[in-house]
Image (tube, rainbow, N blue to C red):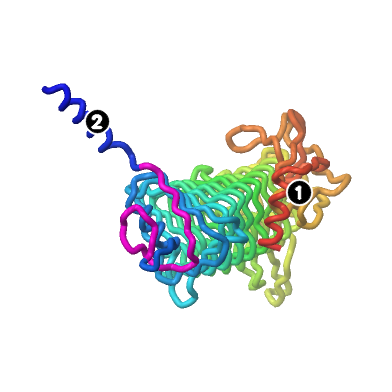
Amino acid sequence: MNRRFCVALCLWSAWSVAPARAVDFHVNSLGDDSDAAIDGICATAAGVCTLRAAVEEAELQNAEDEIFLPPGIIMIVRGNLPDLQAAAGRLTITGAGFKESVLHGSSSQIYELIWVKASGWLKIRDLTLENFQGFVTGGGGVITDGGTLVVERCSFSGNQSNYGGSIQQLSGGDVTVSQTAFANGMASQQGGEIYVSSGLFRCHECIFEGAHADLDGGAIYFASGSSGRIENSLFAGNTADRDGGAIYSEVQNGGVELVNSTVTANSAAQNGGGIASPSHQLDIYSTTITDNHADSDLDGTGDGGGVFYFVNAGSLIANSILSGNLASVTINGGGLTLAWPSDCSGPVASNGFNFIRNILTGCDASDHGCCTITGGYGTANPLLQPAIYNGGSTRTQAIGPGSPALENGAPGGCADGMGGELLTDQRGAPRVANGRCDLGAFEYGSLIFNDDFDLWEWKWSTVVP
């Protein structure tokens, strides 16, 4: 072969298989018009770059593109944005800050913002998604169907759907959320904010407040084929008309872990005012569960004010506090139903270092109001304080001075389900190193100084009061 021809052919081959170069698209319009032509340039017929036009350009490029949004409210009025598939490469949409860049769904139309298809990849950060209504397909904000979704420093507010008011996760895939607030989402079926059908859902430093599901999982619903880990997060004031005021899980074999988190003031009309895992396992580590209410409609059907477990799945609770939760009791021959202390219902495996304060005793095993605990536990009052900002990105409930929860954790330190020592509490404040940490999500006496956590506290307190 001619050497000159070979060199030319090799250079052409290398160029032809090289990935497209990354492109940055800078949106300069708050409109919602489409791109005039798919030519690598974001420009509508009016010559401006909209979010929709930028996604249309990026969607056909196998590259690592990034779209930058300006401050302001972008009204999404022309239906959902183009689907993202493997051919779209990796796309990042970056706002000017969650208080500055807002994507707002049209009240007159029903659709999600965007659908991440199989092998698609999307990151959204520093923006707000509000008022999306995905009642046709589910997932009021974002649907992932085997794709990857990463969410950083965002806010989801007032999104609605049949399954997953803000995010619906289907057909596997991976969803990772960090430093993000979810408020006032609603599902007509399950998962007021998040519905995980299959795949892995992870959430770090998240807030879930004021969400509602007409059936199960006021904030999050985990179906049987999914798994998840939630850490350093807050669930407050979420409701379900059936089970699991904050979280409902059908996951098997310990596929869901709740770590270093607070579950407070949630309610369910039936079982599990805070958490319901009726047929499988959900493990809890260094978490505070308090002031939740099962049977919130007081019709006499509903157990487990804090947590509700149904079959003997061996759900583990470690270094945690369950206190001050309510269910109901019917008296006077069924004539009167009252709220009654009830922290748990069903079989629970305690590692010996928990406070589970209110246990229904003297009942038959067939009575689901019973909480059958294997392993030791304490029943003292942990002296929990109100949920306020004690530093960190989420509200926490401190343990008061002299609380018996002080230094009552497992010898050698608190750990998660993988055996890894938890070096910080929910706020990110230091845990006791190589010693007995405090029970629950708050380490007494640990202070947070002028760092990123204080910054997030100030920011998030303006998102969710």
Sequence-earlier tag: 1 or 2: 2
Of residues 443 and 364, the one nearer the viewer is: 443
In the picture, the quarter occupied by the N terminus is top left
Disc 1 to disc 2: CB gap under 8 Å: no
Measuring from the top left, give residue 20's x and y in whole percent.
Answer: 34, 42
Name the magenta segment's main secondary structure: loop
The part of the image, by quadrant, that contains residue 18 is top left
Number of other residues with Cα within 10 Å of mark 1, as a class: few under 14, some 14 to 19, many 20 or more: many
Q: Residue at x 78, y 42 (%)?
A: 449
**Residue 277 visible to an observer of this rendering:** yes
Q: Magenta stretch: residue 38 in it? A: yes
Left or right: where does residue 91 sit relative to residue 332?
A: left
Q: Disc 2 residue type?
A: Leu
Q: How many labels, in total? A: 2
Left or right: where does residue 222 sit relative to residue 355?
A: left
Measuring from the top left, give residue 430's x and y in whole percent.
Answer: 74, 37
| Pointer 1 residue | 391
Measuring from the top left, give residue 406's x and y in whole percent.
Answer: 82, 41
Q: CA distance from mark 1 to mark 2?
A: 57 Å
**Residue 368 visible to an observer of this rendering:** no
What range of the chain is rendered magenta?
Answer: 21-44
Of residues 99 and 315, the one nearer the viewer is: 99
In the picture, the quarter occupied by the C terminus is bottom right
Say which element carries label 1. loop
Q: Residue furthest left?
A: 1
Which mark is on residue 304? none
| Pointer 2 residue | 11
Q: Residue at x 57, y 54 (%)?
A: 126
Of residues 137 and 311, the one nearer the viewer is: 137
The part of the image, by quadrant, that contains residue 293 is bottom right
